[in-house]
Image: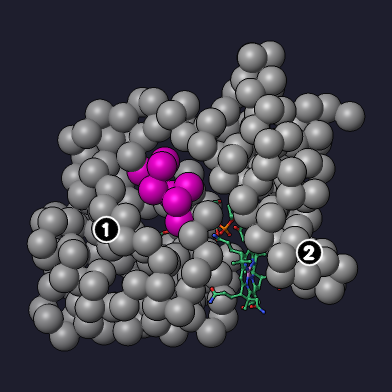
Amino acid sequence: MSILSDIAASLQRGEDDEVASLVRQALDDGQDAVAILHGGLIAGMGVVGEQFREREIFLPDVLLAARAMYAGLALLKPLLAKDGVPTAGTVVIGSVRGDLHDIGKNLVGIMLAGAGFDVVDLGSDVAPERFVDAACDHGASVIGLSALLTTTMPVMKDVVELVRARGLQDRIKIIVGGAAVSDAWARQIGADAYGYDAASAVERVRALARTPA
Ligand code: B1M
């Protein structure tokens, strides 16, 4: 087994200390941080999601896996964000109201900061008004919304509508993403962009931030 599959397996068992030590070892061996993220941490969490859906594991197991994911992510964060040149603009991000999933959103925030954006992270379970108020307060040109539940996706539409109701749609662009979301959904609710993963989110936000108001 490769060290990346060891990391994935250890994450599935929820072994946070072991994940941290394997990630450290992989970095010492010269493995690339992005490869460790995708081949180890995200791959492991993908299996956890499948097992949870099939009811082979239960919520406490998923929580342990999430804790292990964070243990690995903490070590990769400085490397993923290392290219940062803080001049690209300000982005407000958060997981929408009712949604407590924040791992993917945090990853998007790390990668945006690495790409030189000032990131205002509102956390999870964020009400539509808070997104729009924060974007105005911080002079952000982009709001990034994350949702992992089909039940919380509609909140994204509320944010789009609130931006329009306040006449801010030319100044503030909206990107949506998260496992529950698709490009078709983004178009359906009138969002300006969809990010499939953290890397594509950075590309889309770059394009949105360049769009003249
Ligand atoms: Co939950 N959960 N969960 N969960 N959980 C899912 C999402 C689920 C698909 C599992 C399943 O059934 N297979 C399912 C949703 C079903 C649905 O609605 N279709 C589900 C459920 C049902 C629930 C609960 C309702 C369970 C319950 O209570 N009975 C509950 C809801 C709580 C709530 O939010 N109100 C719940 C709770 C939890 C935990 C708290 C235990 C934990 C979250 C811990 C945390 O985030 N701090 C958890 C976890 C870990 C998962 C799974 C297993 C993994 C999610 C994850 O972190 N993935 C997940 C199954 C899955 O998705 N495979 C599942 C890794 C992360 C890197 O990927 O977040 O997709 P992801 O982010 C990606 C992209 O989506 C994208 O980039 C990221 C990096 O590539 N992206 C963006 C994300 N946000 C973006 C924003 C962008 C652009 C791209 O622009 C702004």
On screen, residue 201 versus residue 134, left or right, reads: right
Q: Quadrant of residue 208?
A: bottom left
Residue 139, x across and y down, in percent: 11, 56
Q: Quadrant of residue 176?
A: bottom left
Q: Main secondary structure of the magenta part?
A: helix
153 over 201 or under it: above or below: below
Query: Can you tell me whether the CB of the residue at mark 2 lies under 8 Å from the nearest atom of ligand 1?
Result: yes
Residue 48, x across and y down, in percent: 76, 58
Q: Quadrant of residue 189?
A: bottom left
- In the rendered structure, does residue 107 fall within the stretch colored magenta? yes
56 over 40 or under it: above or below: below
Q: Which residue is mark 2?
A: 50
Span colored in magenta: 105-112
Q: Which label number is shown at residue 129?
A: none
Number of marks in the rendered image: 2
Looking at the rendered structure, the secondary structure element under dot 1 is strand
Q: Identity of the amino acid at label 1?
A: Val
Q: Identity of the amino acid at label 2?
A: Glu
Quick check: can you spot residue 117?
yes
